[in-house]
Amino acid sequence: MKLQIRGGRVIDPANGIDQVTDLFIAYGRITALGEAPDGYTPDQVIDAGGCYVLPGLVDLAARLRQPGQEHKATIASETRAAAAGGITALCCPPDTVPPIDSPAEINLITRLAKAAGQAKVFALGALTADLKGELLSEMAALKAAGCVGVSNTLRPVTTTLVLRRAMEYAGSHDLTVFLHPIDFELANQGCAHEGAVASRLGLPGIPAAAETAAIGQQLALIEQTGVRAHFCRVSTARGAAMIQRAQYDGLPVSMDVCAHQLYLTEIDIGDFNSLCHTQPPLRTLRDRDGLRQCLGRGSIAAISSDHQPHEEDAKLAPFPATEPGISALETLLPLTLQLVDDGVLTLEEAVRRITCGPAQILGLSAGTLSVGAAADVCVYDPEQPWTLDERSLLSAGKNTPFLGWEFAGRVTHTLVDGRVAFELTA
Amino acid sequence: MTLHYPAPGASPASIQITREGRLKHFLTIEGLNRALITEILDTAESFASMNDQSVKKVPLLRGKTVINLFFEASTRTRTTFELAAKRLSADVLNINIGQSSAVKGESLLDTLRNLEAMYCDMFIVRHADSGASQFIAHHVAPHISVLNAGDGRHAHPTQAMLDMFTIRRHKGDFTKLRVAIVGDILHSRVARSQIHALNILNTGEVRVIAPKTLLPAEVEKLGVHVFHDLEQGLRDVDVVIMLRLQKERMQGALLPSEHEYFQLYGLTEERLKVAAPDAIVMHPGPANRGVEISSRVADGPRSVILEQVTNGIAVRMAIMSMVMGANPGGAA
């Protein structure tokens, strides 16, 4: 199978390419850029005139809800939604039911993802057994089964001693530790940012210090153990600045921010809008602007979707009783590109944050259009305005506060291993 | 089913007012205008005079069914709502849900749907979660009105209205008043509603007095002056509102002991001397004597605590009749 993508603006930050040209694909791989290889006759041509041709997006965090929560979503439904959003590789955190703490879960997920044949799925393994934060998981076995890192997700590690040992053990196996910076005592079961809005609405608050205190402690342990670490979904300006400083000091740390934290703030909770119930919570305008600054400086190397699809009932309750999270696969690309219009990032840098940036954090070779690389490609028409509504969402989760938002452009084709996984129908 | 979610950034309380500016639900004080609050107080005044008469019933809500839907225990609030509804000739059903349905796995929405099927006209709701009454108002059948009898730490608007009613009866004009609210503001839905009501009524100065552990973040943005010292905070105030201190606050390391709390924030006759000579003392009840207030003050000449309870009936009658669109003009 040979496929030619003709006349698009090819943007490949990893190789410093931004030019209008043709992309040639054969047998699942990118074979040439610009000039067709000798004797190349395409079976299919995609006319990408006026479109961006991007590396397929890489998402650092998407809950697929399988195994264990198939009433919310499945690997099949969510990888299809990912492809519709231009995402060709995604990483699922280990807080499935049961958690990903043995090769069995990784094998199951890999099998289901292969069968679905859409976006590629990579898994993080549990940092501690059953994510209980008490005993180490069998990290060597997890790594052998293919996990791309280890994390305790949004569950507490019981003591700093266990965290230190888990970091040391992960480091011994050359695994990156993915940390969610939350001091659970300080968070104290809150459900909104501790500030003017939570005070007015009487919602139990999560102070910014719940994040910064955890970052301080985790940075100290990273320095002690020398482990490679990634900070997930940083939500405060102060926290991002602390990690940025650690980077300048030479610590092997990276961080990402989820797209909605670059747009929404505590104010969007408005009149108890449960669609804006997230964890970490939506913070202040200053936090949002601080995160945008760190993104512009490059200290935040990736933007993730933090996709968390829910069934309707999960959001149909009084705010504190609802489940946190946003269905976000299909808004990752439009929200990221909107940052270009907002003057936060150049187009190349914006694309980098959702392709080779996250791929590098995961240690994957994905996120580029290098000749010889897997032909994971996203074709995006920057001038095809649309409005996000429930019907247009392919994800099983319709829980997004961005319903009704207008976006400038949309994905027209997504290729996974040279195969058309998604094509926009008129 | 198509879901209706409030749009992000929707102004709070917008669903409780009809397009014509009438009360449809009564969920929070925030967002109400002064004219409407004054109308509630005036209407309550007409019911209050009626409560002194030997025949205490009016037929304004005859044929209407009111359901007291309490997901959290309450004696005083539930009783005064029940009495108010009965004096308006409504049929009243008390349902104490507590934890039982939650344990059975029935969702709040299921519970609502079942009660709606019983053809009732008004839900009076108390729930432990902030925003619960707003949620219910968003999802009930359109003919049903929802009255918030306390949701989490968010709002207790009828309590705030009866407090305003009591203050107005004693002090008249709010613009010249200094009002201090003392105690656990952080966990208090009563305090939040009082602060909104006092500010909408243009109260001269609203103060909160508490240690930082009992104050919500950025509380000053609600429109109050913050004091950590009781004596400074009480200086020259016309109204002192004491809040109940829940005993479990010691567990959360919010306070060292009841003893120290009373030493620092307990209202005694001695402490009250710095307030205006005719200052009144209020408490939403039930009071912990010897913890936040001494018996001599609670039972003393400045105390209007029992009046608050009595006024609660007239104020709730006024609000119930207004949300049901009944004309209380003939009631007086």
Image (cartoon, rainbow, N blue to C red):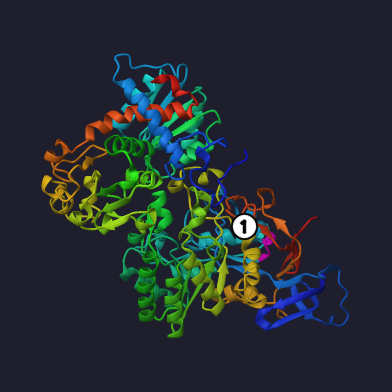
* The quadrant where residue B57 appears: top left
A158 on left or right of B7: left
Q: Is residue B126 above or below residue A109?
A: above
* The quadrant where residue A117 appears: bottom right
Q: Is residue A86 magenta?
A: yes
Give amino acid for label 1.
Leu
Who is closer to the viewer here, A59 or B138?
Answer: B138
Question: Residue A259 appears at what percent x and percent y?
Answer: 57, 64
Question: Residue A61 appears at what percent x and percent y?
Answer: 54, 64
Instruction: Look at the numbered disc 1 and give the secondary structure of its residue.
Output: helix
Q: Is residue A164 magenta?
A: no
Question: Residue A114 appears at what percent x and percent y?
Answer: 65, 61
Magenta-drawn segment:
A83-87
Who is closer to the viewer here, A44 or B152?
Answer: B152
Which residue is the site of mark 1?
A112
Who is closer to the viewer here, A277 or B177?
Answer: B177
Residue sitting at x 52%, y 68%:
A257
Please state the chain letter of the residue tagged with numbered disc 1 in the rendered image: A
